[in-house]
Image (cartoon, coloured by chain):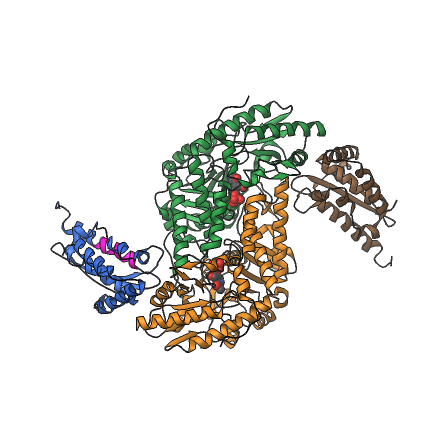
Chain colours: A orange, B green, C brown, D blue
Amino acid sequence: MKPTTNIDIQKIREDFPVLHQKVYNKKLVYFDNGATTQKPQSVIDKINELHSFTNSSIHRGVHYLSGLMTEEYEAAREKVRSFINAKEKSEIIFSSGTTASINMIAFSFGEKYISEGDEIIISEMEHHSNIVPWQLLCERKKAVLKIIPFDENGELIISEFKKLISDKTKLISVTHTSNTLGTVNPVKEIINIAHKINIPVLLDGAQAIQHEKIDVQELDVDFYVFSGHKIYGPTGTGILYGKQKWLEEMPPWQGGGDMVDKVSFTKTTFNSLPFKFEAGTPNYIGAIGLAKALDYVENIGVEKIKSYEKELLNYSTRELNKIDGLKILGHSKDKISVQSFIIESIHPYDMGMILDKLGVAVRTGSHCAQPVMDHFGIDGSLRASMVFYNSFEEIDILIDGIKKAQSMLK
Amino acid sequence: MKPTTNIDIQKIREDFPVLHQKVYNKKLVYFDNGATTQKPQSVIDKINELHSFTNSSIHRGVHYLSGLMTEEYEAAREKVRSFINAKEKSEIIFSSGTTASINMIAFSFGEKYISEGDEIIISEMEHHSNIVPWQLLCERKKAVLKIIPFDENGELIISEFKKLISDKTKLISVTHTSNTLGTVNPVKEIINIAHKINIPVLLDGAQAIQHEKIDVQELDVDFYVFSGHKIYGPTGTGILYGKQKWLEEMPPWQGGGDMVDKVSFTKTTFNSLPFKFEAGTPNYIGAIGLAKALDYVENIGVEKIKSYEKELLNYSTRELNKIDGLKILGHSKDKISVQSFIIESIHPYDMGMILDKLGVAVRTGSHCAQPVMDHFGIDGSLRASMVFYNSFEEIDILIDGIKKAQSMLK
Amino acid sequence: MSINELQEQIIAEFSVFDDWMDRYNYLIELGGELPGIDPKFRTDEFLINGCQSKVWLNAEYKNGIITYTADSDAIIVKGIVALLVRVLNKQKASEIMNIDLYFIDKIGLKENLSPTRSNGLLSMVKQMKLYALAYHSKYEGNKIN
Amino acid sequence: MSINELQEQIIAEFSVFDDWMDRYNYLIELGGELPGIDPKFRTDEFLINGCQSKVWLNAEYKNGIITYTADSDAIIVKGIVALLVRVLNKQKASEIMNIDLYFIDKIGLKENLSPTRSNGLLSMVKQMKLYALAYHSKYEGNKIN
Ligand SMILES: Cc1ncc(COP(=O)(O)O)c(C=O)c1O
Ligand SMILES: Cc1ncc(COP(=O)(O)O)c(C=O)c1O
């Protein structure tokens, strides 16, 4: 029996045109939301409208369209600010994605605060985008990367984390929510521990922002980053939130138009926040589209989304567990609606190929989190990542598909 | 009398919905193309279609939509390759814009080849995006930036350039075409001089790619960069072309998903080209949109565009020169259809405000090229940048507007 | 006259204009009439840089009253500067501090004081109020008003 | 049989299948039947890494003829590997070098050899041809064929 729910799933699905696609003449079941989410009509229409009626380059324009677009762009920044409840608009930097945001911090924070022998702490469950920038930085600065391990449930081992902290620790960068295990980390606790000894914390919110209410002031987090395309917005957009005191002190990452105050060959001075970190013509159309996506999410209601996705998680956990030889990776107490799993003696890619033919889009492989795979001693897994526009019926189709593939592959 | 022309301007204008806007109840005359260009319907429709029917994250996906999008994304790369006649597809890196492309090279080339005392040559007519990244690099590496001056016509002084070259010169980075003076630089000559002593050359093609045929092999240029939004494509897209031998040797700039081969905490290896330089989920929708824009340009014909824009340049030069006290900045022999000008005893911003009210969108200020303003001892200028969808009638409206403003402001 | 009386006066003046051209012509006139700032204040120290046009501002305090002088290198901007000075000059610091300058909107100049226009005007208004606040708290901080 | 005769044979075999399920079932069968590669070749050196699935390939040359053995960790991929081996194994290096493997398209497996699928198959085909080319130029470089 399906859970009853307070969400009108049919109505919501109407808003997302891609969901009505057929692939190989089968109804598409889109469970690859961890990789990217679909866009509601309101976002598509907004982008269309901007391209058709008002497109013009922002900032410093003296003409009407430029003024209009600048206002919309800055309103988008205000929207993001209020969405994550940042204190100041100037703490919101538009980037091209989570990866760019993390690299920006790694470079800029690194230039200012990291020197030989310093330590940076990340975790074993990070996405490559929250590993490699730190490896590159550590190599450049001869600093050291420390890793918080996770336990058999896929939860960070806080006692181990505490042991890693030393007076050389300069930054802690962990994922708010794991894209593979689904674990929602105890970030409040991590931040508290770190702040007791004045270590700043960066949270990778790429898989958290679309699933629960984020309040950066309440978290008291120093840096928070996420991607637009994973929260129903356009590709090529991302956010870097940073506390003003850090952003003020940190040097710019990229040089170019808009991020400068005055340029001469003898002396260049930089613009104020947030522009110091926004070099070049920004993806203003994308940013405004992202704001529209946040509007959409707020209209549905983040709490409503969260509770419905919880039901999707519980239902899929129950049904997946019924399948012979199937093992779910990640059993944290607090978990988003992401299911990574492996099936005895079946290669995930074989399973994925067959599910694909049945119209079910899942991800296979390492999910850009090879250390998680290494933890379990596997090469890859399957991953079904569900969001509020997915239905219980779709989970049934997935389950039937897995069984069918199993019978073919055994 | 207007020149006769081989371009059906009415038909072309139909393709660009923004051009039919009214501002303050006046017909919009859009002469801010140097800042950003408008998008043809085919690009708008393509983006719409991708968002509505096929959106899905690319690379490594096992499912249908992911395969489809990956194919389109890689086809977009091939389109860019053929558009600039690069030898290999793997030499085409998608970035978020010219500024990002230059910063990528400044960092990555800088890490590998620049050390204390080394010299980098740029010119006096660069956009800030081709100045500040080098200043930041030089500061970090204690290297030295050398500046090629330009003469009263706005042409680079090649004899001075030759004097700047030394055995410490590691890179020459100049703009192909000036966004302020309109100068098309003798890049072939510059490259020849540089290559004789094995110095690589980067060309900033942000204002060149949309005006003439670029053949990177014929130019034998080492790096070529441009922005999608300035060639009728979406914001948040850009290209970095680099010769394979350089890109192979250069270290990655950003770390993240897709740019790695294997990640572990002890050893991370990088993916092959072009992926090594494309960290994180790329703006794949933007990239495919950009390819559509290149299709559009090819369909009109780059040569046709060039010759028509030449007429716009000549006509506007003649008409502007008739205006009392008006001085055009930049009289190079080879010039794109960009007119920067100042008017005696009138502040460009005042003029810009009045033109705006008349529906004419021009840019005022320093055009992100403050050293050019310094050269002329001014704070800013007006700039009308025209492209093939502009008409002679629109130039007349500009001229009338200037006269009207002049009578108000005198 | 009080600040609000002056605001009403300006609104009345502008109400006779039919279109933007009349308004701009009037602003140009006002800009031309505004005596430039004393050259000793026309320096970087008193500059409010708006990228597109420059605005210089000086404020002096005496007995709770603030005297502003200001200038701009662009004439239309200077016209707006003249209006701002006319409204706020020789007013009480305590009143300037928190005043709502609604006349700008009413006379159709809102866009010129938008944050999207980097002409220095918005910063100038902020700076005028900041001076008032600063002087007020320096000299009248312990008074109740 | 010649390469093209083998290609035609496979096309004929697949022509009886109604849908992808039949085809995949057959590939799974073929994958199961293909003897694994000699464990000494199941090493990184012989690995063609496709991210999603692994493919191992070895090629040996004797008298102008190439013998291939191959393996994969994914069974459907291994089925396709089996087809590729069946077509190219024990053929002349000079023929393999430039062969058009049109059967893949004809039997509806094109997408599995697309560059968008990082399953190693496309790289395997390339590698098979490269071996042929390498051996050919090493041992037959001066012959005309
Ligand atoms: C010559 C030149 N270089 C670089 C840029 C920067 O391009 P973008 O802002 O798209 O990064 C521009 C455009 O503003 C330009 O005109
Ligand atoms: C936890 C996490 N961090 C970072 C990223 C990288 O995001 P993007 O590829 O949008 O830069 C992802 C998504 O792939 C993710 O899931």
Whether the magenta-drawn stretch holds residue C8 is answered as no
The secondary structure that most of the magenta stretch takes on is: helix
Q: x, y (%) of residue B268?
A: 39, 62
Q: Residue D80, how many percent across, how many down?
A: 26, 62
Left or right placement of residue C126 versus residue B226 in this view: right
Query: What stretch of residues is rendered in magenta?
Result: D120-131
Pick whichever, C63 or A302, lies toward us.
A302
Is residue B59 something that shows in the picture?
A: no
Res. B214 image quadrant: top left
Question: Where is A347 relative to B206, above or below?
Answer: below
Q: Is residue D102 left or right of residue A305?
A: left
D128 part of magenta stretch: yes
**B181 relative to B118, above or below:** above
Q: Residue at x 72, y 36 (%)?
A: C20
Residue B361 placement (x, y as % from top left): 61, 37
Does D2 sit left or right of A300 as displayed?
left
Comparing C137 with A292, the one in front is A292
Residue at 30% x, 67% y is D74
Evaluate whether residue B267 shows in this view: yes
Q: Quadrant of residue D34?
A: bottom left
Specify whether A30 is left or right of B329. left
Number of marks present in the image shown: 0
The answer to which of A207 and A222 lies nearer the viewer is A207
Quadrant of the image containing the N terminus of chain D: bottom left
- Name the residue at the top extreme: B1
x and y percentages locating residue C15 in the rendered image: 80, 39
